[in-house]
Image (cartoon, grey):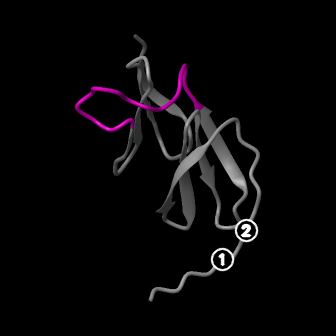
Amino acid sequence: MACCCVIKYKKIDTFSNLWHIYQFNDAFIVHGEIEIIRLNKYLEVVWSFSGADIFVTIDMPHDAFQMCDDCIKLYDFNGSYYEINYKGELVTSKMV
């Protein structure tokens, strides 16, 4: 039987649901319904990014959230595309 324990807990104010937490170097990237958040190792918000709609895709050949080596690729429900760097800065966008 696997054992799991909570090492640290912190409430973070967000606009909506948070779906996935990914470790990134000594920080964390959180994929939420409406926003992408970067937390430092102390679970403090470093930056957040939001698009025009929720980060969900339906009937598209790709995921709504993709972490790459140098950027995060995002698609929203309307099909708009966003590319942000790991500083939370918008690099590219294509609005539908």
Mark 2 and mark 1: span between their CA atoms? 7 Å
Question: Where does label 1 land, which residue?
Answer: 6
> Where's residue 23, x and y in %?
49, 63
Say whether residue 32 is left or right of residue 65.
right
Q: Quadrant of the N terminus?
A: bottom left
Residue 52 in magenta stretch:
yes
Name the residue at 55% across, 67% down. 26
Question: Circle 2 — which element?
Answer: loop
Residue 75 in magenta stretch:
no
Say whether residue 47 is left or right of residue 11.
left
Residue furthest to the bottom: 1
Name the residue at 28% across, 26% down. 59
Question: Where does label 2 land, which residue?
Answer: 9
> Where's residue 37, x and y in %?
60, 46
74 above or below 7? above
Name the residue at 56% across, 59% down. 28
Question: Circle 1 — which element?
Answer: loop
CB contact under 8 Å: marks 2 and 1: yes
| Magenta stretch in the rendered image | 50-64
Residue furthest to the left: 61
Say whether residue 67 is left or right of residue 42.
left
The front one of 36 and 54 is 54
59 above or below 84? above
Kind of residue at badge 2: Tyr
